[in-house]
Image (cartoon, rainbow, N blue to C red):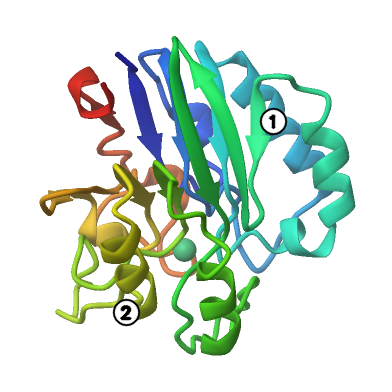
Amino acid sequence: MLRTTFISDLHGQYQRLKLPGGDLLLCCGDILSSSKSQKQTVQQISDFCQWLNNQSYSVKIFVAGNHDLIFEAEKDAVKTIVSQYSQIYYLLFEHVELNINGIPLKIFGGPYYQYYYSQVKQCFKLTEEKRIEILNKIDPDTDIIITHGPPKGFCDISNQGNSCGCQNLVGKIIEIKPRLCAFGHIHEAGGIQANDQTWFINASIMEVGFHTDYVNVQTTQITRNWVIEPNLLE
Ligand SMILES: [Zn+2]
């Protein structure tokens, strides 16, 4: 059994989380605050990793999101910081193979999302061609896929009623049937869905309608973190 907690779209507010502890902690990006008035710094990456390291989980895995500009600008610094922590894995379109509590898991992760134009500066923007190239790198025996954005049709409906997920991603998931896909990005679509083979978890912790440019993040309520029953990963 694996006690797993999923979190996403922390937007600098991770200090406010009270996580239950367990075996595996997965974080699906948009980690740092992205307010226009304050530039992200390498120190913030260090602070986050230190916080992550203090959480009571055997393994912690994370990817970046479209607002984590410093993770794209300072790729080497991120690697150096993460390498100081033996329990933390940062995935940039790559696999990691782990054995947690006797359960072997192959995990693929990266800051993957379907890009839509917005006035807000975004990072890790990928053309469809590049996204397909990334999806083709995913091993067919992968157990868990961590992305920033949702696959189309699963926990991806925006406030405006649009299905914002990636069609290519859902195609890949249906093809290789991982046990679990975790993502965030569309805050208002937080929740859990499943098809016959795969659990889909939109792990966004923020309230519906939250947007870093329009809402004071300090006062935004953190409504949830997703703790999955152990039998999902038996
Ligand atoms: Zn996002």
Q: Residue at x 12, y 54 (%)?
A: 195
The residue to which callout 2 is attached is 167
Q: Work out whether residue 152 or residue 107 is closer to the camera in this orientation and state it.
A: 107
Q: Amino acid at mark 2?
A: Gln
Answer above or below: position of 79 versus 113: above
In the rendered structure, the answer to whether residue 201 lies left or right of residue 135 reads: left
Q: Work out whether residue 184 or residue 224 is closer to the camera in this orientation and state it.
A: 184
Q: Position of residue 53 (x, y in %)?
A: 64, 19
Disc 2 versus disc 1: distance between alpha carbons?
32 Å
Q: Residue at x 19, y 70 (%)?
A: 153
In the rendered structure, the answer to whether residue 5 lies left or right of residue 120 reads: left
Q: Position of residue 20 (x, y in %)?
A: 35, 14
The residue to which callout 1 is attached is 49
What is the quadrant of residue 226 in the picture?
top left
Q: Position of residue 27 (x, y in %)?
A: 48, 40
Q: Quadrant of the N terminus?
A: top left
In the rendered structure, the answer to whether residue 227 lies left or right of residue 168 reads: left
Q: Work out whether residue 130 or residue 111 is closer to the camera in this orientation and state it.
A: 130
Residue 39 visible at all: no
Number of dots carrying numbers: 2
